[in-house]
Image: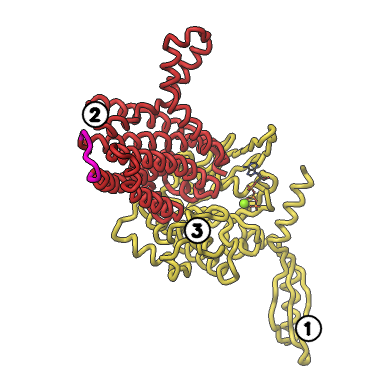
Chain colours: A yellow, B red
Amino acid sequence: MNAIEATGLKKVFRGKKMQRVEALKEVTFSLSKGEVFGFLGPNGAGKSTTIKVLTGQIRASSGEAFLWGQPVSHPSSRQNLGYLPENPSFPDTLTASDYLRFVGKVFSLPQGELQGKITSVLSRLELDTTMKRPIRGFSKGMVQRLGLAQALLADPDLLILDEPMSGLDPLGRALVKDLISELRQKGKTIFFSTHITADVEQVCDRVGIIVGGRLQCVEPVEELLQEGLSGYRIYYRKDGTMCELPAAREDFPREMETLLSQGIEVDRVEPQRRDLETFFLETVERARYEN
Amino acid sequence: MVHTLFVARLTLNALGRDRVLHTLLGVSLVLLCLVPAFSLFSMRQVQELAVTLVLSCHALLLIFLAIFLGSSTLWRDLERRHTSLILGLPLSRSHYLLGRFFGVGLFLLLFSLCYALLAVIAVSVSATFYEADRPVIWMNLLAALGGDLLKAWLLAAVAFLFSTFSTSLFLPLFGTLAIYSAGSASQEVYEYLNSDFSSQISAGVRWLAEIFYWILPNLTLFDLKTQAVYSLPLDIPALIYPFIYGFVYTSLVLWGAEFFLSRRDLV
Ligand SMILES: Nc1ncnc2c1ncn2[C@@H]1O[C@H](COP(=O)(O)OP(=O)(O)OP(=O)(O)O)[C@@H](O)[C@H]1O
Ligand SMILES: [Mg+2]
């Protein structure tokens, strides 16, 4: 069973004065268990709209979507889901532990384990000291961390995170990346949206790029990086000075051989690749051109 | 169904920490302390005036609370996008809506109970100043307070209904206020139209008024003040009918609210 299954999602927002905004034109993809999927797209591409459809916040104008085989219109599709909305906002007179307690109960966590889970998830996100404080007094990054905490509390197998790194400092970003890698290791399925290609490169198995409401491509990250490999740069020492030698992909073995046969000490080799960022920019460019 | 209770508890928890409500509770406490003093202004009807004051204050505060909390609870959740967190949980919209409503309803009930306790003290104190013709019938006083509570629940439900399809606070707030005014007058208008004084009024208007009479809540039903003030006997049907009416009307309104909320895009 796929963790996420979306077919032909379309969404038209109807504003005042009969304005029509086609936020999603065609989004079809699926995510199998254990995959980490990065959802890339420029501002206004439809990332959050897709996520809102998947989590039952808004209804697709057409198409259908399932989480763990259950239609997203049904609350039980979210029984095994942790969801972090974009810029989460909490009822702010409550304390972090009040709210997490509520979340735990909705997920039917056993009463006895609840407090332990709350403490551990808050400390994982480095929020332990703020447990008893009203959320009103939280900083932006703290609210974002609490958003992650509530998504992780019930230890769900699927996580849908809308820009999990937004509003976080470099420490927080590193924390979230660690967290994602850790969850991936545990076999959790993660779907997250972002603008930052480097994040995707580091933690994702596959990447989907959405532009103008249309999913342009879904590719395995590893393959993209391999395909994008244009050549290598060889650094070696000769007479005490550092030299560098660019080598095309197909020339690389021969160049190396020559150097080594001359008894030259090779210092290091760096792959030269078109990174995900370039690929992303190219995809966006192409999509915009085609429209 | 347990989900409803969790949401209700969350709601109550948040309301308990609300500063505006603390202020309001303080105000009502002061008002109640003043009742015995004010009731002395009436020379002979000290007890009757005390009961009237107590009941009027209660009705006023409760209706204010019902309209204010009813309008702002859902509206705030939708406006500040608390819903995207809460409804991102495995929680159905109808359980969420009912939970929010029960939370507000429970808060009104708790308020009413505290008020009733203090009201009994205030009236007892006033009654010692001048002996009334008839002693206070406490059941009547409680019934009258209960009537106000039923009315408040109904109005809170109406405010919830308005907030499910409105994007501004304006509609739930003033819409409910309008329903409250119309609902308080509808019985009188209906009786007037069916009396001899209104023979010249056209059939069309009469027909329209009839429709409104059946659609709008009849809030006069919940008014048991006279019996409480003058310690008149109160029969059981007089209590049961408003109770059933309030229950059915409130349920229907909530059902409507659920209908709209389940179709709304939470953006
Ligand atoms: N409620 C709404 N009414 C009208 N249009 C909307 C609404 N919500 C989103 N849109 C439009 O849908 C499109 C996609 O928006 P969405 O929020 O999904 O973008 P996004 O990819 O998440 O962007 P960002 O990176 O800025 O978060 C945008 O053009 C936006 O203007
Ligand atoms: Mg977004």
Mark 1: amino acid: Cys
Spot occupied by residue A241 in the image (x, y as percentages of width and height)? 78, 89
For mark 1, what is the residue? A243
- Residue A84's place in the image compared with B259, above or below, is below
Label 1 sits on a secondary structure element that is strand
Q: Magenta stretch mostly in which secondary structure? A: loop
Earlier in the chain: of badge 1 and badge 3, it is: 3
Magenta-tinted stretch:
B128-134
For mark 3, what is the residue? A147
* Residue at 37% over, 38% down: B56
Q: Are marks 1 and 3 in contact (CB under 8 Å)?
A: no
Q: Are marks 2 and 3 on the same chain?
A: no
* Chain on which label 2 sits: B
Q: Nearer the viewer, mark 1 or mark 2?
A: 2
Q: Are marks 1 and 2 in contact (CB under 8 Å)?
A: no
Label 3 sits on a secondary structure element that is helix
Of A165 and B167, the residue lying toward us: B167
Spot occupied by residue A171 in the image (x, y as percentages of width and height)? 56, 72
Whole-angstrom CA distance, mark 2 to mark 3, is 58 Å
Residue B185 sits inside the magenta stretch: no
Mark 3: amino acid: Gly
Residue B232 is tagged as 2
Of B197 and B17, the residue lying toward us: B197
Residue B77 is tagged as none
Spot occupied by residue B232 in the image (x, y as percentages of width and height)? 24, 29
